[in-house]
Image: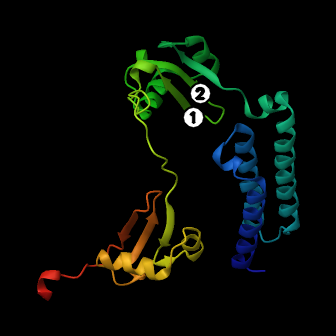
Amino acid sequence: MNHFVRTLLMYAFVFLVVRLMGKRELAQFSPFDFVVAIMIAEIAAFPLEDTSITFSHALIPIATLGAIEIGLSYLSLKSTWLRSVIDGSPAVLVRNGRILDQNLRKLRYNVNDLLGQLRQKDVTDISEVEYAVLECSGVLSVIKKSQARPVTPQDMGLATGYEGLPVPLVIDGQILFANLDKAKLTYQWLEGELAKQGISSVQDVIYASLNSKGELYVSPKQEYKPPDLYNNL
């Protein structure tokens, strides 16, 4: 078996295992997940570097690691203790505008790291922070004090309408007919709306969506040039 085929097969198998492990491992990379990912990467590389190693010597350990990860994920749903062992626990680093230096020392987390992550959350004044919590994934969650938060319509007593999520109708020049049907719209309607914006073909659209107000957003492809209406006069 040549290197090209071996690489394709190993890629497909590792991809399948990672998919079975679920999206949680990709979104919340705990220390346990990190160790499993490193081990899978190392084991997968062995038969690709040394063709004398049979595939089974790599596939069985990778499948075992994937099964352990999936099994522990299910068990952690039922056991708070196991969940804390695998994922750890969130730690409060700032409370009511004061840095909790004891928690920083426990986590070996210095003040510069804290200030850097606060700036990424658009916080420059620690006195504005009600809570800053270091999550198990390493992401810092910041809750500002009520007087430091941006004013919302609710604060001003203003009623707002429902927004919802925009419905994609066209992606990369391809019409999503299922979404068009859900919105109870037709291909002819879409063509007409695009024509109003000077677009004659759906293939010239990189993205189009419909919001909850019935407004159509259209983003043409960069190479698309709208017709010069003045030359046609």
Gap in angstroms between the C-alphas marked 2 and 1: 6 Å
Which numbered disc flags the more N-terminal residue, 2 or 1? 2
| Residue named by callout 1 | 139
Q: Secondary structure at mark 2?
A: strand
Three-letter residue code for mark 1: Val
Q: Position of residue 215 (x, y in %)?
A: 40, 62
Viewer-proximal residue, 103 or 11?
103
Instruction: State left or right for residue 195 relative to residue 142.
Output: left
Compared to 163, does 15 lie above or below?
below
Viewer-proximal residue, 225 or 93?
225
| Residue named by callout 2 | 134
Three-letter residue code for mark 2: Leu
Viewer-proximal residue, 227 or 128?
227
Q: Secondary structure at mark 1?
A: loop
Q: Position of residue 46 (x, y in %)?
A: 76, 61
Point 48% across, 50% down: residue: 163
Q: Position of residue 155 (x, y in %)?
A: 42, 27
Instruction: State left or right for residue 21 relative to residue 219.
Output: right
Quarter occupied by the C terminus: bottom left
Residue 42 location, quadrant: bottom right
Mark linked to residue 74: none
Point 80% across, 30% down: residue: 85
Compared to 225, does 131 lie above or below?
above
Point 38% across, 84% down: residue: 201
Residue 56 location, quadrant: bottom right
Q: Are circles 2 and 1 on residues that touch, CB within 8 Å?
A: yes
